[in-house]
Image (tube, helix red, strand yellow):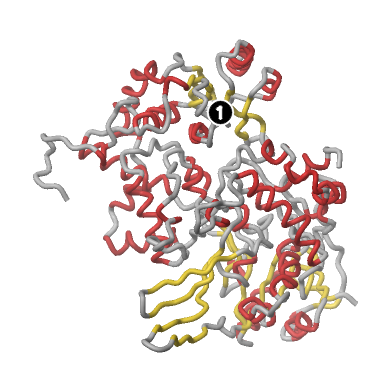
Amino acid sequence: MTRILQSDKLDNCVARWREAGLTVIGPVKNESSSSYAAVEKAAEFDFSLIMPDRSIKELFFPQTEPMLHYTIKKQRIDTSDFTPPPEKRIIFGARPCDASGLAIDDPLFGWDYKDNFWFQRRDTTVIVTIACTKADDFCMCTSLKLAPDSTKGSDVLLRPLQNNKGWQVEELTDRGRDAFNEIADLLQDGSGPAAPTAVVAEKFNLDACVAWLQNPENFESTFWREISMRCIGCASCTFLCPTCHCFDFQDEGDTYSGIRRKNWDSCSFALFTMHTSGHNPRATQSARWRQRIMHKFNYFPGKFNVNSCSGCGRCSRQCPVDMGITETLQAISTLPS
Amino acid sequence: MTIQETYKARVKKLLASGTVKMVIGYKPGTTADRRRPHFIRTPEEADQLVLDSACITNLSGYLLSEGLLSDEKAVAIFLKPDGIRSINILAAEAQLNSEQILILGFDSNDNQVTALEGEKVEEFTTLIESIKEQAPEALKNPLLEQIEGMTPKERFAFWQGEFSRCIKCYACRQACPMCYCRRCIVDCNQPQWVNTSSHTLGNFEWNIVRAFHLSGRCVGCGNCDRACPVNIPLRLINAKMAQEVLGAFDHFSGMSHTQEPVLASFKKDDSETFIL
């Protein structure tokens, strides 16, 4: 029997989870921007958003994060590690594309060593995803073989009820079950009809794109220059992307002591690959855009067997010059491989 | 014939005759309200050209794309008055030769697009002078006045809140026609002069450095403000600096292609009795 969580009980759930020591996080919109942010009351959530402007990534991989404190002495260097706060969290109302993005990045952060900054947060966060009943012109999850009700990366999937008064609860993992056991008495048995999931048209043929990208002859194609001519080289697409994960180390302090930080970095920047000699192997914006597409749909799947894109569409939605993955892959779809 | 069609015919003629090698304009975007920059090199490519009130991006920054102007061939570009002023600044700062630029001027008010007479940047001087006349009024903004009414502490808190969303994507810089430095100060990393971290200090450093660097240079096109993915009201900072520079030095950016940059010029009759 499916269980139902009614919207009017959500405030009690938030209170219950908070009493149990969980930080409750969800989609929040203020005047100018939206993100996944901590709330105290259910009324602070905004489930009407297609998705928050900022992806869920920053809750696991913050834009800037201290890694270690260093002190340089005459004969030795002392360091002390920072570790992420051992806070337990529940993210209520993640979008399936955001949750999938986390699952896509898990093998990356656990590849040659286990990145504790990522996994400590992953291990202590419950992800409760709400299936999408609305999409906009930029959504493209179906093109990535995902769906508006994908369960990938989620601990619980909620399907909005047709009457808009609650959600069907689908527990997917033990972590999800534990979190919902906390509020078991606030749930109802039953299975009111779920609202239809959003219709997201397939925008490009992924397999055809991947085949074209895998053909080494296309690496030097003039296509890259044409498609990226208007790219201005900012990092809006990479920083809003739920799967882009590149970072830079920065030491902040003086000669004797300071903090080493991990900051988001972007392949869109010329500085990203600049050598100390001044030579830049990715000297042009088209080479940088090619890298972004190749990384997501050729190199990353080559290593981890999954595309580094969950189809949220933020790259196109927020691009100052209306570029993005959709346009590029649509164009590639039409090229002979 | 609509203005769009008139301009389309003109663009085709400019390309067919070889008068210009490229026209930078607009084409349809992903959604009905979006326009994309469009680089037109053949008369056929002009078929996609769009000119309407949704064409708001100041395209002048593309003129500095590496190698574009180095063959000394002419390039035509669709510009609103703010973009035309950008050409004057870029020429005054020796970033381009305005002789090479053929302006396809337009303006839009109340969703109506009107054509602007002229091709060379000098031909728009009267228009720019009239914009300067209106500037003290046009630069006014209720939110700006509200911020000016705050105590320094409140003001600091306001900007701290706004800047706290900054993710250091540098979309503001990249979208700005005036941010053409080959190597931005934040990218100078030996030593790292400006923190790249998006913590409070780093965010203040970046946004204040940029505000000063744009003082007397910003034309208020709004590219930075629209590009910001987290909607920091950058227009307020630039409008405030424009007000200051206008009030203190009677300097309005982009008046002519020989106008001296306000922060790089010295006048003996300057009202200040000292140099900082």
Residue B108 shown left or right of residue A294 in the figure: left
Q: Name the quarter where the N terminus of chain A is drawn.
A: bottom right
Identify the subunit bearing mark 1: B
Q: Of the residues shown, which amino acid type is indicated by label 1?
A: Ser
The residue to which callout 1 is attached is B53
Residue A27 shown left or right of residue B251 in the figure: right
In which quadrant of the rendered view does residue B45 lie?
top right
User: Going 58% across and 23% down the picture, which residue do you hit?
Assistant: B23
Give the vertical position of B132 relative to A148 (above or below).
Answer: above
User: Going 33% across and 25% down the picture, which residue do you hit?
Assistant: B256
Callout 1 crowding tier (Cα within 10 Å): few <14, some 14–19, many ≥20: some
Q: Position of residue A85 (x, y in %)?
A: 56, 83
Give the vertical position of A303 relative to B109 (above or below).
Answer: below
Residues A272 and A265: in front is: A272
Q: Name the quarter where the C terminus of chain A is drawn.
A: top right
Q: Position of residue B175 (x, y in %)?
A: 50, 43
